Each structure stands twice: as C-alpha cells, then as structure tokens.
Image: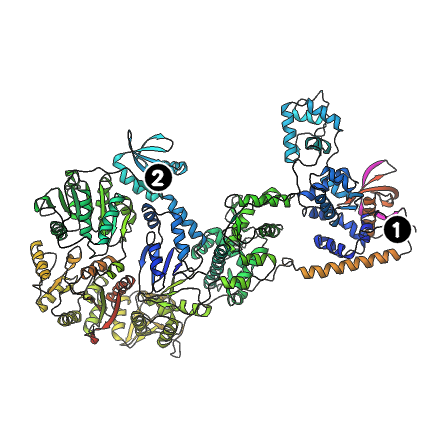
Amino acid sequence: MSSSAPPRTLADQFRSWPDERLVALLEVRPDLAVPAPTDSAQLASRAVVRVSVVRALDLLDRLQLETLLTVIQVGPAPSDVVHSFVNAAPEAVDAALDRLSELALIWGDPETWRPVTVVAELLGLPPGPPAREIDAALADLDDRARTILDHLDETDAAGTVANATWPVRITDASTPTEVLLAHRLLVPRDERHVVVPWSVRLRLRGGRSTRERIDAVPGLAVGDRAQDLVDRGAAGAAYELIRRTEMLLETWATRPPGGLRTGGLGVRDLRAAAELIHADLPTAALIIETATAAGLLALGMNDELDSAWLPTDSYDVWAGRSGAERWLTLAKAWQENPRLVSAIGSRDGDKPINALSPGLERTWLAADRQTALTALLDLAPGQALAAGTGIASLVERLRWRFPRRPAGRFELVGPHLDEAALVGITGLSGVSSFGRALLTGDDPVPVLDALLPTPIDHVLIQADLTAVAPGPLEQEFGRQLSLLADVESRGGATVYRFTVDSVRRAFDSGWSVVEVKDFLASSSRTPVPQALDYLVDDVSRRFGTLRLGVAESFLRSDDETALTELMHLSAGALRLRRIAPTVIVSDVPLQVLLPKLRELGAAPVVEAADGTVRVAKPEEFRARTPRPRPGTGRDNARLAARTSAVVAAVRAGDRAAASRPSRGPARTPADVMTALREAAASGDEVWISYLDNHGTSTERIVRPREVGGGQLTAYDERSDEVRTFAVHRINEVRTSGADE
Amino acid sequence: MNDGPLIVQSDKTLLLEVDHERAAEARRAIAPFAELERSPEHIHTYRLTPLGLWNARAAGHDAEQVIDALLAHSRYAVPHSLLVDIAETMDRYGRLRLEKHPIHGLVLISADHAVFTEVTRSKKLAGMLGELLDPDTIAVHPSQRGNLKQALLKLGWPAEDFAGYVDGEAHQIDLVEDGWNLRDYQKQAAESFWHGGSGVVVLPCGAGKTIVGAAAMAHAKATTLILVTNTVSARQWKHELLKRTSLTEDEIGEYSGARKEIRPVTIATYQVLTHKRNGVHPHLELLDARDWGLIVYDEVHLLPAPVFRMSADLQARRRIGLTATLIREDGREGDVFSLIGPKRYDAPWKDIEAQGWIAPADCVEVRVTLPDGERLAYATAEPEERYRLASCTFSKSRVAEQLVRQHQGEPTLVIGQYLDQLDELGEHLGAPVIKGETSVKEREELFNAFREGEIDLLVVSKVANFSIDLPEAAVAIQVSGSFGSRQEEAQRLGRLLRPKADGKTARFYTIVARDTVDADFAQNRQRFLAEQGYAYRIVDSDDLPIKD
C-alpha cells in the first residue's frame, strides 16, 4: 500500500497497488480479467458489479464474512474499531481485513476501511434503535416475542411475515411479531421479510457481532489407521475401478446398449451393467459416468445405425496404458466431472433420472467436491476420519470455511466421500498416499504402480478344465485367452473355463489345433492336463467335418453317417435334401441354418465361394472421442500468463489516462459506465446529459448511488429525490473535474 | 500387495493357491465359514454363502474373525463392499431367538425391534405366531417350531434355537471299543454335534459315518430312531451297531417294508415313512411310537421332501444328520439348515484321505468308438433312445471284459444301469448280478461272500449305489450311469474309497462311447471328479491295458 495520502476511490487504490497485488486479485477473481479492462478505472467499476461481488463473497470464510459485515455496519472505520466488534483475536481480524482488501471487497487503509457500496447493499443490516431503547424494549417483551427474537438471532435468518412494512404502534400491536416491529427490535428488510437490526444484534450478542469466537477453524474428528492398510484398501478400490471400467467397455464394444431418445442410458441397461460388473447401481452409475467424463465412452452408432453407447477410440489408447496411468485418467475425470452422479436412480418429479442423461450438470459441483477433498488433506498419514463423527466434523469445518454456501450442498459431502472411496482416493476413511499425490498436484502414478498387482502373462490350467490367472493378465494375452475360454469368475484373479463351445469359438475365429495347443503350453505354468488336450482334439476332430455353402445353402461332409444323422434329425425343419452321399443342400438361408445345426450338436464351418473356410470374429465398435469441455481443466500456468498480461494492459491504460491532458467528458457507453461507477463509489456529483421518454435531452446534476442491471440509481438534485435512469439513455457524463 | 495364498473374487468365491507355503494355514482360517466348492490340483475354490456364514455364526465365529481371516491371507486388497456384505449377513443370524418361556412355552424373542416388527408382520409367518407378550416377545405355537425356522430363514433372518430338547426315554447305550478305537475326527464330530444340540456332520464316504452316529447315540443314552435310505442300508446299520455298541439284537428293531418292529433303537427307511396309502402316510405313527431322545438322519442330502415336512414336527427332539455332502441336487440346503440344524462338523475329503483313512482313487475314462453299424443305429435313433444305445454298445462289454481280466484276483465291481447289459455281462464274465429284483436275503449273501473274499467279481445295478458297505472293492468299472449326476458319482466313488487292507490305490474305470451323449455326460463326471481333486485320465480302448 502506498505511503501517500489515503486513496480517494477504489480505482485510485488499484493504481497505487504493486503489480503482484493486481495479479493476485485477478487470479482470485478471474471474471474481472475477461475481457481485459482498459485501465484501473474500468477494472474498479467492474470489481463492484453485483454478480462479480457475489462470486467473491462466496470465497470468504466465516471470520472474513463477519469482519466484512462489521466494516459495512461501522465503516468507514479504522482497524481497531473493527477489532472491537469482531469476536476474534485482533491479528486474525487484521488478516481478514487484508484478505478482504485483496479481494477488493473493501478499500482504504487501516485508518479508514470502506466497503464497496454494492457489498453493503447485499449484506448490510439496518442500523436499529439506540442501545437504551433496546434495553427498555427487551424488558417489555413477553416470552413468545422473546422466543421469536432469539430464534431469528440465533439462526441469522430473515423472518417471513405477511406485511412487514405496515406501520405499527406499540399500543396497536397484537401479535408478538407486531410487538417486535413496533419496538424496532425487528426491522423490515422488504415487504415480506424482517431482520434483527445491527444494534439489536450487538446487544443480544454481548457487544460483538457473534456470540462465539470465530477465529478457530473447527477441527476434524480423526482416528488412527495404519497408512499401509489405507493404501491397500484404496489400491483395491482403484484396481476394481479400472477393472470394472475395462470389463464394461469391452462388453459394450460388441453389445452396446442403446441411447435413449433423451440421450441417457436406460434403467435396464444400467441394471445389466451393474450385474455384469458385480456392483450396486450407484457404483455402476459412477463407473459409467466417469468413463464418459474421461472420454472413453460416448454416443455413437451401432451396426444398425441406431444411437448406442460405445467405447471411443481413446479407449484403445487408454487400455494400452499401465494400471496407474489408467487410474489417473479416471480419477481426474471424476474430480472434474460437473455432473451430479449421486442423483442417478432418484426421481425428478415422476421421471426417473437416468445415467448419462442431460441436465445433471451443476456449475458448483466440481469445486465443492474439490474443497471437500482438499479439507481431507489435513489428515496426517496414519490418520483417518473417525467412524461416525468424522463426516459430521468435516461438514462443520466446510460450513465455517464456506458460510455462504447453501445448506443443501453440504448434504453432498457424504456422497462425495463415498465416491472418493470407490475411486480409491480414500481407503478405510483415510487419504491414500496416491490420492494425496493427486490432490496436491504430485504424480500419483509411481506410488500407485507399486501398489497395484503387476500384470502377468501366465495361467494355471487344471484338470477340471479351468485356467486361473492369479492376477491381472496382460491385455493381449487376456484377449486371446478369453477367446479360447469363458470367464467364470473375476476379481483380483480371473477364472476361465474351457468348454466345447469356447474351443470351437477359437477355431471359428481362425485358430488351428497346433496354435491352440502351443498357446496353452506356452501360457500355462503347470503341465497342460491330459483332459484339456483331449477336449481340443475332440473339438478339432469334429470341427469342420461339415462344410456349408452360401448361395443355395449346401452341406457337405466326407462323413456320410454324420449326414444321415443330420438328415434324420432335421430334414423337415431345415428343408434338407441329400444330393450325394457326402452332400446335402437346403433352401433355408445360411443365417438360419447355421445356429440350427449347432443346436443339433454339429460343428459346421461356413465355406466361401472358392472353397476356403470363412472365419468369424465378433465386430467391435468405436465412437469418436468427444472434444474436451473448454474450461474444465484449471490450467494455472495459462491463467497466470493471462492475468499478468491483463495487468500489463491495465497499467498501460492507466498511463494513457494519466498522460491525457485532462479528463474529458465520457461519451462512449463504456466510459459512461466507468464514470458513473466511479462517482457512485466516491460519492461525487456528476453532470449527465439524459434523453427522456419523449426524446428530449435534459441535463441534470446527480449523485450516483448504484449502477447495475442497466439502471443508474442516483439522487437528483433538481427533484430532490432518488430516482433511476436508464443507462443507455445517458449520452454524456462529466465529472466535476472534467472540462471540454 | 500381500503375498498371501488367497484371492478374494468379487463374486464371493475365494481362490486358494494350494502350493503356496501358507496354504494350509489359510485353509484352516477360512474353512469354518467358506464352503469348499472345487478342489482340483492347483487352486481350490471356496464360496461364501449366507448359509455358510450362518453356519460359522452357529459355531461361534463372528464377522470380525471372518474379515480378519480374509484380510490376513488375501494376496490382493479385498473389495470393501464384500466385507460390508459379510458383516451384514452374519449380523442377521441370531437377531431372533427361539426360547422356552416358563409360562408361555415356546416364544420368539428379538433384541432388535425393527427386525422383530418386520418378521411379525410378514404374511409368510401368518398362523405360526400367537399373542404378543411384550414389545419384543411373541408366543409361538409349539407345533410351528420347525415351520417358523424354515420361514424365517427364507426371510433372511435365521433364528437361533435355544428352546432345548426333550430328554426322551432313557436307554443305556455305550460304545464297545474292543479291537478298534474311535478315530479322532469321529470323536470330534460326535462331540461337536452334542454341544451344538442338533445339526449335520459332513464326512466323506468311507470315513465311518455310522460310527459317528453310534457315538452320538452313546452321548444321548436314549431311545433312538434312525432313518436310512433303504433296507440293505438298514441291515448294515444294525450290523455295525451290534459290533460297535453295547446294544443287543433284541434292542434294535427294523421298520421297513418287510418288518415292522419298534424297539428302543429302531431303524426305519425313508421309503416306508413316505409310503402313502389313500392319501395318508400310514407309518407316520412311528415317529410318535416312542419318546425318542435322538433321531439320526442318514444321507441327509437324499432326505425326501415329505420327511422334511415330518421333521418340522420333531423340533423338540435332538437330531443328527450324516452326509458326505451338503449339496442337494434339489437346492434345499436351507431346509436342512433350519430343520436338521447347522453344520456341526466338516472335514475336507482330501484331508482325511491324507491321514490314510480313505484309499486314494485313480480315475480312468476309457473311450470306445461305436462300430459303424451301431453308429448308424445311434444316428437315426430317437433322442430318448440314444443314451441307452450309446451305453449298451457291444464294444463296451468287450472292454469291460478286458479290464476284468486285467484285474483278475482283485475284488472288482461292474456297475451299470441297463439290466440287459448287466445280465449279458454277468453271463460273459460268469459273475452274479445284483439288481432290483434280487431279494434282500440273496443280496446280503452275495455281499457277504464278496466281503469275505469268496467271490471277487460282482455285477451290480443302481440299487447298489447307496449305503452298502463293500469294504474290499479295489476296482470299479462303470459301464453306464444315470445321466452323470454329481451325487451319484460321489456315491460310486465312495464304494471304492473304503480303506484297503494293503493300502493299494483303488481304480475307477468309466467306459464311454465317443461322440455320443454318453461322452457329454462323461464330461460332467470328469469335471466333478477333477473338482474333487482326483487324478483323471482318458485312454483310448485301443491303448489298453494301461500300465500302473
């Protein structure tokens, strides 16, 4: 802060600030920098716009908010006066004042702090009656009135009444509320609401703005939990997240669920997904939403050109990465996802809320979630939120930190933590070491890699025709194995079962007996059991004994008995005709014939026109990766570069303005706004030229009070009243110092 | 990552790596609450089921122990949701208790009012409950004790039964250990049962379940009703009881189709109990004929449905169930749990085998090819005829004869389903055939002769499947079986698993016709046996004889 005379206006103060301080302001209130303001005057006028101020207020904690309220009520005031009203240590209040000044919610210096006007309108309380009247009035109250007053005071709430502004005299007052209004212990805020005025509040709270001290941050209820247990639990969750995502998307690649007309995923598909991945519905919804947020799943077209949810081409890239990298993608997507996933499955009116349906975005959600997670970082390694009271204490702390946040949003803290546990950022209510790395901006990948099971490239094949992979399989190996065997059980390990059908499936997709046997021998740590060898041989012996044509549908086989058998079984239904000892034809289309034959236990192969065997592999579908949403990534480096550029521009504008010989009248709309805002902040009179409803130009001297919503509210000297002017009708503004 | 031998899967199966150095420790830790489902050579699969967890609760284990065991031995992190699920499931057992009230008789008591309200309002319990005695106690009609337990289990709130038992009419029964001793596990099994009140003892075939039954009777020292599957088995029980206990001929009665004796110890067949004439069960009065102090159910997994219904009325009497497997083909494991009682003792088959009480078996599948003529007949046959055609192929008979010759001198059983085939085989081999129409007397004589070593070859049909002790059979040749049921397989193998005097490996041959439905059934059998941990080989009939 400059050592020279106290600043006259907020703009003046900005001019006196060092660059770092302006940069800091633009970083915490980025909306001020877009588009770049031309000079300090414009920056100052933008800083007092209601929308922007409301945003800045949401950043305050309880202490800062009470300090601000005190400055509004008693300001302009020096620091020590503020100290005497805020129930906190003076140093803490000083820190709060500094912060408020940094945010440009107050300005001035420790000798005189002033609130920016719009803040006073947003938060200010009516002053209330003088102290001695209060005492008399309080003594006069009956119990019912006193209860109402105490209740409103304790909850800091506004009371709703039928008609607040109706003037009441003490003698006429019939209801307790009327008594309170008549005594001015309650003061109308507007027609329907009454509030406890400032002086009454001070009286009720023992001379301070709050009863309790507000400089202590509420502590978290913690318990001890060994960090390695936390890490193991969280790594288990992280692994499950990756595995389930992969399993679901692999399945949806071949059998995609349809997209609803409204864009979401049907309840039945969600249920099927939950069953597939052995999870409950909320978990399944979280996995689906997170995969979508990560760009791994999107709407595309299935082979019938219907809209369907499909893995994207980035899924392939993702699937090829290491476990920890895959987790990082999902965890980040979850962190930044603005969608209220916990609402899925509940009802909006009588309509169920579907997964992936539009309309679940909440602008505040990602930030709220982030603040809850950041608060958890205060848990030391080896600590966890205490069972039962832990979440409540976290909510209490967040309430202190964000007193202006609507109460309903604190109810989501529980769901946020549940989701964090499913993602693996927390485990057993403690923060995992890789989760901590993610939240503090370090690289969680090496930490997590050490905790995840390492992919293996072998299985144990057993005589009951199962193969057990005692850990996650390398991707390509896993795919090959699932072609040859059916998955029976999943989890940390995977159990595969070889059956006639599964082995035939491998033959169907072009494997030969030798390939199958080589694959088994090379992938099993244990000798391949004799029974499996027999199974493969059995299938291969029968595989291809029947050959089936397309055009007229023919069946041929060197095995005459097999054909006789077939003729006997199905001659009627399949309209088979035997044309030679080894050949049968049919006029049933191939697509119908093939499954029927398989049903009958035959293992035919389809033959192409040139006599070669056609192989069938299920087609996999991919959708295009959606472009990332702009603005979701908080790219600090870019922001920093931008804000310092903005500051440089503001400085240049200031120099230009300073080097102008003198201030001319404001004629452009931007200048008009700036001039009016400056005048409103400083309380100076201005001369305006104004075009009235009839198109007549009039000139007035006014004292602006507020500029906002396209309206100027100002005290008009000529009519001696406060009135409003449409800003777009003001074509010129001159301040007292301006000349032609 | 913890280097444990156990992997917990999200579908509630547990995989145990057998060759891991800590496998034995982990097995002991999880055995009380997880059911062994498969035990092939490398990785054993256990399953967590509500019944298994409740069995563990009944045996005094709590959720904390179960979760500790999983966490301590698991190689990877255990899914959190699974742990929560275990705790919740186990917590459900014992919220409700059946007790004896000094004034009101049988009552249902709950420590949890919400659960109590839920179940008392349930329509499924209508008519079983009496008046409400206080907010958490309700009278129960004494006749509904069993039905109520069944219904509560279905509702997911199994009740613990503390209502006690009637002592029954006292009758002195002692074990007479002359020249033999109760094995450790048999003793443990009988004691676990006695302390638990009622329940099921699971022991593999050949492990001496009859002796466990006798030991239980010696604990009860009261009149006993023994329910068995058939008459031969009833005689077997009588024989065994005379040999092992202080009971005399006069004290043991047989209540079957042939004889209707009611004595202090009465052995009845399920068949006679469930026999129905003009819509009523005329032999039900047996259950009330005496003041029984103990009821023994042999082969609980075969207990017919009507006996379940009757057992519901016998809840005031001590009950012991004996079986080789809790798995029932009809899925009524829950009824066994609520009407007979929780599992009181279980010893893994392989462990007892390792102790040397059961001879290990070597399973061989011999594949025969149908000759062309038969193949054509098979191909054109109606589906219902096919199995018989495949089973009775001439080539099977030839292979069976070849095997019999190979094992000449060793006690051998040839087992089959089709009488024509069995008769033909009997004729060719010059061996006696036992089938349904063979009289009980004749059967017993033949079995005796086989046991004594007078004859070393028997051809038997399905009737020989259950509960007949053939101690010295070293070789079994199965030429056809009834559609590859798991249970039948266990029985057949059980025949061979009796301890051999010379400790020799028993051999179990199945002859299978290649490329027929027979082979498909063989696939099931192979899977079951491999899952039970038996060595299983396949050979071609052309490659016979195989070397040992």
> Residue A665 has which mark?
1
Q: Position of residue B286 (x, y in %)?
A: 15, 41
- Could you say which is closer to the camera, residue B506 or residue B176? B176
Query: Looking at the image, which residue is at 57% across and 46% down?
Result: A220
Where's residue A25, x and y in %?
A: 73, 53
Relative to A254, say whether B134 is above or below.
Answer: above
- Disc 2 element: strand
Which residue is pictured at 29% across the width and 69% down the height? Answer: A531
For the record, the magenta segment spans A717-740
**Quarter holding residue B42:** bottom left
Indicate the amino acid at tag 2. Leu
Label 1 packing within 10 angstroms: few (<14), some (14-19), many (20+) = many
Give the label on residue A352, or none. none
Q: Name the residue rendered at 75%, 43% in the picture.
A: A118
Residue labelled with disc 2: B96
**x then y, percent, for residue B270:** 17, 48
Seen in the picture, residue B37 relative to B138 is either above or below; the reply is: below
What is the residue that sits farthest to the bottom in this orientation?
A: A610
Three-letter amino acid code of the residue under disc 1: Pro
Residue A723: in magenta span? yes
Specify the subunit that label 1 lies on.
Answer: A
> Marks 2 and 1: which is nearer the front?
2
Can residue A122 be found in the magenta stretch? no
A722 vs B201, nearest the viewer: B201
In contact (CB < 8 Å): disc 2 and disc 1: no
Q: Is residue A61 left or right of residue B4?
A: right
Left or right, A316 with respect to B189, comes to right
- According to the image, what is the colour scheme of the structure? rainbow
* B148 to the left or right of B81: left
C-alpha separation, residue under disc 2 versus residue under disc 1: 88 Å
Report which quarter residue A608 is drawn in: bottom left
